[in-house]
Image (cartoon, rainbow, N blue to C red):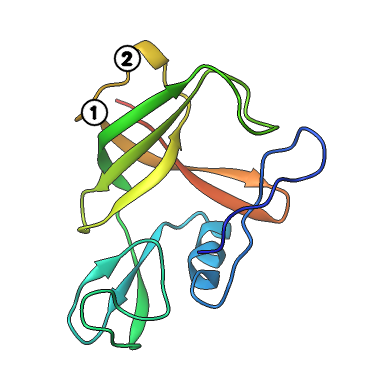
Amino acid sequence: MKPVVDAVGSQKPVPVPDAASAPFWEAARQHRLVVQRCEACGRDQYPPDLICRRCQSNRLSFVDAVGGGVIYSFAVYVRSFMSGFEAPYVLALVDLESHSVRMLANIVDTPIPSISVGMPVEVTFEDRGEWVVPQFRAVRS
């Protein structure tokens, strides 16, 4: 995936899809979380790439992810390093339940003191202009 670019003013950055990541971002627009799968060896990978990082095949597709996972690690940012992100905010590595991938995403709609390693989370989506960004929040009962 290409890096995101900062939007004008105090808006959050938006995705800049490339050939490898465009299907991921198009699915996000539909509020669907997908991961890339190699059709040659069956490995799932994130972020999307032009070839499989295991076998170097270019036979790649995208499959729906359940959208649940657990927090592997997280950091609470008490200072904003980019316009649009009001501190404090949480950035986490999330292990997806249904796929052997770890995603980097914000944890939202969850009180910061309640966030912990191993916490079950579910995907949620944030509209950012013409694009939509997957994020995670604590599983709601």
Q: Quadrant of residue 74?
A: top left
Q: Amino acid at mark 2?
A: Ser
Residue 139, percent across and down?
31, 31
In depth, the one of 96 and 93 nearer the eye is 93
Residue 81 lies, with reference to residue 111, above or below; the image says: below
Q: Residue furthest right?
A: 9
Q: Quadrant of residue 22?
A: bottom right
Q: Quadrant of the C terminus?
A: top left
Precedes in sequence: disc 1 or disc 2? 2
Q: Which residue is mark 2?
A: 114
In depth, the one of 57 and 116 nearer the eye is 57
Residue 7 lies, with reference to residue 107, above or below; the image says: below
Q: Circle 2 — which element?
A: helix
Q: Amino acid at mark 1?
A: Met
The residue lying at 57 percent from left, 56 percent from top is 3
Q: Which residue is mark 1?
A: 119
Q: Are marks 1 and 2 in contact (CB under 8 Å)?
A: yes
Residue 53, percent across and down?
28, 74
Would you say 1 lies left or right of 46 here?
right
Residue 77, percent across and down?
48, 22
Residue 39, percent across and down?
25, 84
Q: From where the camera sits, is residue 130 visible? A: yes
